Image (spheres, grey):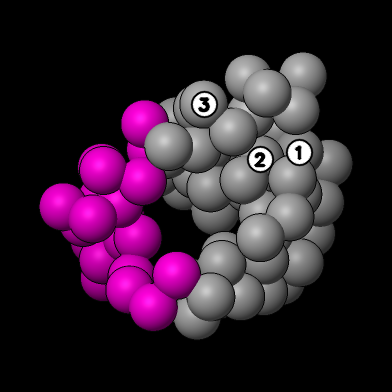
Amino acid sequence: MTDRQIRCFLALYETLNFSAAARQLVLTQPTLSVNLQNLEAELGFPLFIRSHSGMELTEKGAEFYRIALRIQGELD
C-alpha cells in the first residue's frame, strides 16, 4: 500500500466521483482508477460499488476510511 493509493482512496471517498478526485489530485482518471484497483486487490475487497448512477462506499470501505485517515496522518 502506497501513500498515493491512500490519497486516491481519500479523494474518492470525499467526492464519490472519479473526475473530481482526479482533478483534486492532479492525476488522470485512468491513473486514479489503477491506483484504486491495485489498493483493492492488495486489500482483497472492494472499497466502492461502481454503477452507472455513481459510486457508493462499501461497508469495508467505510471501515478502511478510518484506517486510511490514521495512515495519512502518520505520513503527514
Q: CA distance from mark 2 to mark 3?
A: 12 Å
Reading the image, the residue beneath label 3 is: 70
53 above or below 68? below
- What label does residue 7 carry, if any? 2
Indicate the position of residue 8 as horizontal and vertical percent values.
63, 48
Residue type at mark 1 is: Leu
Q: Mark 1 to mark 2: distance in Å? A: 8 Å
Say few, some or many: other residues with alpha carbon within 10 Å of mark 1 (under 14 / 14 to 19 / 20 or more).
Answer: some
Do residues under tags 1 and 2 come within 8 Å of each other at their CB atoms?
yes
Q: Is residue 15 visible?
A: no
Element on which disc 1 rests: helix
Label 1 vs 3, first from the N-terminus: 1
The percent coordinates of residue 38 (x first, y second) are 61, 75
On the image, the x and y values in percent for residue 34 come to 67, 74
- Residue displayed at 36% across by 46% down: 64
Query: Tag 3 or tag 2, which sits nearer the N-term?
Result: 2
Q: Is residue 69 left or right of residue 71?
A: left
Disc tally is 3
Q: Residue furthest left?
A: 59
In the rendered structure, the answer to whether residue 76 lies left or right of residue 35 reads right
Q: Quadrant of residue 47?
A: bottom left
**SS under mark 3:** helix
- Marks 1 and 3, Cα distance to the nearest angstrom? 19 Å
Depth order, front residue of 57/68: 68
The mark found on residue 53 in the picture is none
63 lies left or right of 76: left
Q: Amino acid at mark 2?
A: Arg
Query: Is 51 included in the stretch rendered in magenta?
Result: yes
The residue shown at (36%, 31%) is: 66
Q: Looking at the figure, which quarter contains the N terminus?
A: bottom right
